[in-house]
Image (spheres, rainbow, N blue to C red):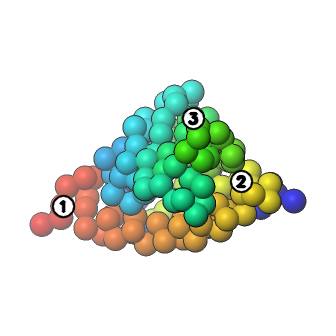
Amino acid sequence: MEKIIKHQFYFPHPTEMVWEYLTKPELMELWLMKNDFKPVAGLDFQFRTDPEPKLDFDGIFYCRVLDVVPFERLSYSWTGGPGKGEISFDSVVVWTLQPKDKGTELFLEHSGFSKNENLDMYNALNHGWEGKFPKINNLLNTTEHGHTKS
């Protein structure tokens, strides 16, 4: 049975500001990881982080932008595997943004964890994603459109 990561978080900030943290590579790096992302459907990109030998993970997530609806929805494939270059898991990340109460409700769905060998990666990512929302919120609280508030 496939496991799916689902989280939601309310940001007391406009949707456009939250969207920037999901789509600008320099802002994504502040809360997620180094990347060469651009919000262009069909674009291949990578997220890079430290290798995790206990997860047999080389530190590179290979991704492709699947869908971009500015300020509403963003999805990309999220694959990775061991340092040998084998892809051992193949998943999809979907972000959905909805204006709510003068802020933004952000929904994350990360699906594709159907193999037993992906259970450790599922657990690591599920926990990891949970910690990312407060990081984005803190960044939004201290910046306004990429500039530090005075």
How far apart are labels 2 and 3 at the CA level? 15 Å
Residue at which label 3 appears: 64
> In the rendered image of this protein, does residue 95 appear above or below residue 62?
below
Image quarter of residue 136:
bottom left
* Observer-nearest of 141 and 6: 6
Query: Which image quadrant: the N terminus?
Result: bottom right
Residue 133 drawn at (x, y percent): 47, 68
Q: Secondary structure at mark 2?
A: strand
Q: Secondary structure at mark 1?
A: strand
How far apart are labels 2 and 1 at the CA level? 35 Å
| Residue 6 visible, this angle | no
* Observer-nearest of 11 and 116: 116
Residue at which label 2 appears: 111
Q: Secondary structure at mark 3?
A: strand
How far apart are labels 1 and 3 at the CA level? 31 Å
> In the rendered image of this protein, does residue 13 appear above or below residue 73?
below
Residue 129 drawn at (x, y percent): 54, 65
Three-letter code, disc 3: Arg
Residue at which label 1 appears: 148
Identity of the residue furthest to the right in this view: 1
Q: Which residue corresponds to the image point at 31% horizontal and 47% vertical from the top-left?
A: 26
Total labels: the figure holds 3
> In the rendered image of this protein, does residue 76 appear above or below residue 27?
above
Nearer to us of marks 2 and 1 is 2
Q: Which residue corresponds to the image point at 43% horizontal and 38% vertical from the top-left?
A: 37
Disc 1 and disc 3 in contact, CB within 8 angstroms: no
